[in-house]
Image (cartoon, grey):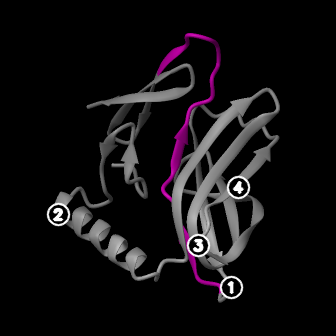
Amino acid sequence: YIEGVSSLGGVTTNNQGENSAYANALESIAAANAAGLLPIELTSFTISASTNGYTFNWVTASEVENDYFTLEFSENGEEFIAIDYVSGAGTTSETTEYEYVWEAKPTADILYFRLKQTDYNGEFTYSDILVYAPKKSHGATRTLYYGPLKLNVVDGQLQYIVE
């Protein structure tokens, strides 16, 4: 399993390896979201690389007292550091799009990113973790290992998991 990741290349997992616990957690999140208890409804969180660095895009369908986002980075998937902060939209039921360009060029074979969302009262939540393997060259295929998983990467994009 990858701690903190709910889906990876179409394969769904959870921290405990128990599908029923994971299903129950998803139902609880859905119920909290329907009741308006979650601070944001994150509909997408993506990354793309260019010669200038990395561009992050994320979209919220709604926000409740959302003060700011912290974009976080890790080279090992466990220890995250803050890249920068992006102001939230406060409270809105409108779709809000965000973009952030990070001009760094880390050299690790596999990179991990997540969003930390912080409310006005200081409470926070985390997004799922984005797993990204930087493109080394066109047509490049690599195999990376993360814990018990064997990850196949083609042109810098995670394609599938081989057990």
In space, the residues marked 3 and 4 are separated at their CA atoms by 15 Å
> Which badge, 3 or 2, comes first in the chain's sequence?
2
Q: Secondary structure at mark 3?
A: loop
Q: Which mark is residue 20?
A: 2
> Which badge, 2 or 1, comes first in the chain's sequence?
2
| 33 over 2 or under it: above or below | below
> On the image, numbered disc 4 is attached to which residue?
98
- Name the residue type under label 4: Tyr
Q: Is residue 127 left or right of residue 105?
A: left
Q: Can residue 74 be seen by looking at this rendering?
A: yes
Magenta stretch encompasses residue 126: yes
Q: As drawn, which residue projects farthest toward the front?
A: 94
- Name the residue type under label 3: Ser
In space, the residues marked 3 and 2 are separated at their CA atoms by 31 Å
Q: Where is residue 117 shown, x and y percent of the image?
A: 62, 70
In space, the residues marked 3 and 1 are separated at their CA atoms by 17 Å
